[in-house]
Amino acid sequence: MTTELTMLAYATVLLVVLVLIQATVGVQSKGLVPLANNRDDVGPATGFHARMLRVVDNHREGLTMFAPVILIAAVANLNNGTTALGAQLFFWSRLAHAVLYVIGAPMVRPLVWGVGIAGTVMVALVDVGVLH
């Protein structure tokens, strides 16, 4: 498997881990029965539970941009040093971003997020022929 597809697999596993943490925190915060029902009267998430919902949403958003460009590169056989570096930048920055988000670290988190976007853009630019 290519580095790019490996990073996509790792990023997907990271999403699964974040969802499991978020679900566990939700059950601890709101209770199993309320979350197992229709959730009409559960109320909004707060504190750490809300933060976990946001980190899951943020990672999902990043994956919706990253996955297509990685799959395009794989199908079109465009894998090279630039796409491998872009994929690695995406995954490692997303892992760091998730950790920073979970611990509530201010200011540096958006910079790390930007590194992930840069990695995605690198792969996209190879896909459209701007970079090689």
Image (cartoon, rainbow, N blue to C red):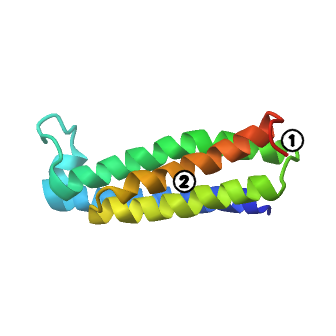
Query: In the image, what residue occupies the spot 52% across and 45% down?
Result: 62
Q: Quadrant of residue 76?
A: top right
**What's the amino acid at mark 1?**
Ala
Q: Position of residue 104 (x, y in %)?
A: 27, 61
Residue on which the image places disc 1: 76
Work out whether 119 lies above or below 43.
below
Q: Quadrant of residue 27?
A: bottom left
Q: Quadrant of residue 107?
A: bottom left
Work out whether 119 lies above or below 39.
below
Left or right of 88? Residue 17 is left
Q: Is residue 13 visible?
A: no
Work out whether 35 lies above or below 89.
above
Q: Earlier in the sequence, mark 2 or mark 1?
A: 1
Q: Is residue 95 visible?
A: yes
Residue on which the image places disc 2: 115
Left or right of 5? Residue 76 is right
